[in-house]
Amino acid sequence: MRQFKYNRQREFLNRDVIRDEQAQLLAEHIEYCREKSPYYAKMCNHVPVATAANSFDILSSMPFTSKDDLSENINYFVAAPECDIRDISFSSGTTGAPLPIVYTENDLRRLAYNEQKAFMACGMTPLDKILLTCTMDRCFIAGLAYREGARAVGASVIRNGLNSLESHAGIIAAIKPSIIIGVPSFLKKLIKFLISENIDPGFVKKLICIGEPVRNSNCQLSLAGSLLEEAWDAKVYSTYASSETITSFCDCEAGCGGHLHHDLAILEIIDDNGNQCGPGEQGEVVITPLQMEGMPLLRFKTGDISQYFDEKCACGRSTPRLGPIAGRKQQMMKISGTTVYPETVFSCLEALPGIIDYYIIAQSHDGHLTQAEVTVSISSDSTLTVETLSNRIAATARVRLPVAIKPYEQVCQQIFPGASRKPVRFFIVDDKETRHEHSGDN
Ligand SMILES: [Zn+2]
């Protein structure tokens, strides 16, 4: 059984030690995949025995693993016997069916350690009370990860999940949490509600934001992030992970990107041809999670677009930092020659007072998203017009998009289709006028 014991001194190792440790753990990981994973056993047939001396070279010679590979071969990725599986969560697949992701006892301990490292880096302490506004159930792994991580820190956790504003307000007033974990657009609604109820959440010191960006590509807080920080008078942190890799990248107290946990993953950023991007260059995030048992992966293409920074952080850590997620690769729009991700537009709308909700419908031509229309609902006292909205989006996204204003009920019908687990705000209409939903979740 692996230890996964947090040691603060090990957070500040120098780069040579980090590289040596990664090389050894990667060698063990490759050999584990060869021995236990039916999917990788075949692929590893031709590669030499991995050692600390050659593991990085072997990794870079291996093909990437895409979400399509997972969807089409999910059972071949399971590397642990059924009796060792302790949790089965689901991730969105590419063929319509959710993908079951299995975790062993070791993987769950790794999950807690991973999140403990992330939370300790952003200053969580055993004295903190953490309010979770994301779900613990519905087969998501994220809520469980946050709970286990906070528990490992020694903090107390209030699992109110996807409850109403009224319910959260009652708990906030009664228990006085010091940290809230949630989706930025929900936290924005929550603070408005607290103010309307005359509840002063002055005891909330940190907001740990998930699922939506709060920083621009240079890691500075976006306007939406700044407004959130101001409204709550609490520091905003961003965290990113995926169900398949259970490796999180969470802002440290310096707030300039999420640190890689070097003993838990290898991070690569690749361009469209699969070549490595340098620091600051945008590309697809590829993760090789280390020390995983249930469903080990090699070079997993997350489909998320970001960049990494490798200069030493102001917090003293030498590990690379992952920048904010610009968007999903599949949702990249190229309009009048300008690259735009839905998140950029969403972030702009979130910063505008009077916006209630919104969605984007993009047009696909020959597999490329070349046109898009933004639809919003606004509050009855808002003075926003189609023109001012279009101007604000153009100022942020550097491209002018047509905007429509519709009643809230109509917008809701669009963004909560069928039994959707969460709002869907991005849709693609292809050449044949077929509509696809893109929730963008991992
Ligand atoms: Zn740092």
Image (cartoon, rainbow, N blue to C red):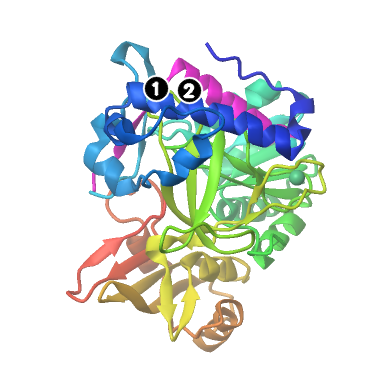
- Residue type beneath disc 2: Asp
Q: Which mark is residue 107?
A: 2
Which residue is pictured at 76% across the width and 49% down the height? 235
- Residue type beneath disc 1: Asp
Q: Earlier in the sequence, mark 1 or mark 2?
A: 1
Is 221 on the left or on the right of 302, as rendered?
right
Closer to us: 13 or 332: 13
Is 108 included in the stretch rendered in magenta?
Answer: yes
Q: Residues within 10 Å of mark 1 (few under 14, many from 20)?
A: some
Q: Position of residue 83 (x, y in %)?
A: 32, 11
Q: Can residue 242 be seen here?
A: no
Under tag 1, what secondary structure? strand
Q: Quadrant of residue 21?
A: top right
Q: Please identify the dominant SS of the magenta region.
A: helix
Under tag 2, what secondary structure? helix
- 1 and 2 marks in contact (CB < 8 Å): yes
Q: Marks 1/2: CA distance?
A: 9 Å
Q: Position of residue 230 (x, y in %)?
A: 76, 58
Q: Which mark is residue 87?
A: 1
Q: Position of residue 194 (x, y in %)?
A: 67, 49
Q: Position of residue 256 (x, y in %)?
A: 72, 53
Q: Quadrant of residue 277?
A: bottom right
Q: Is mark 2 within 8 Å of ligand 1?
A: no
Picture layout, residue 127 above or below residue 185: above
Picture layout, residue 339 above or below residue 322: below
Q: Can residue 81 be seen here?
A: yes
Specify the segment rendered in magenta: 96-120
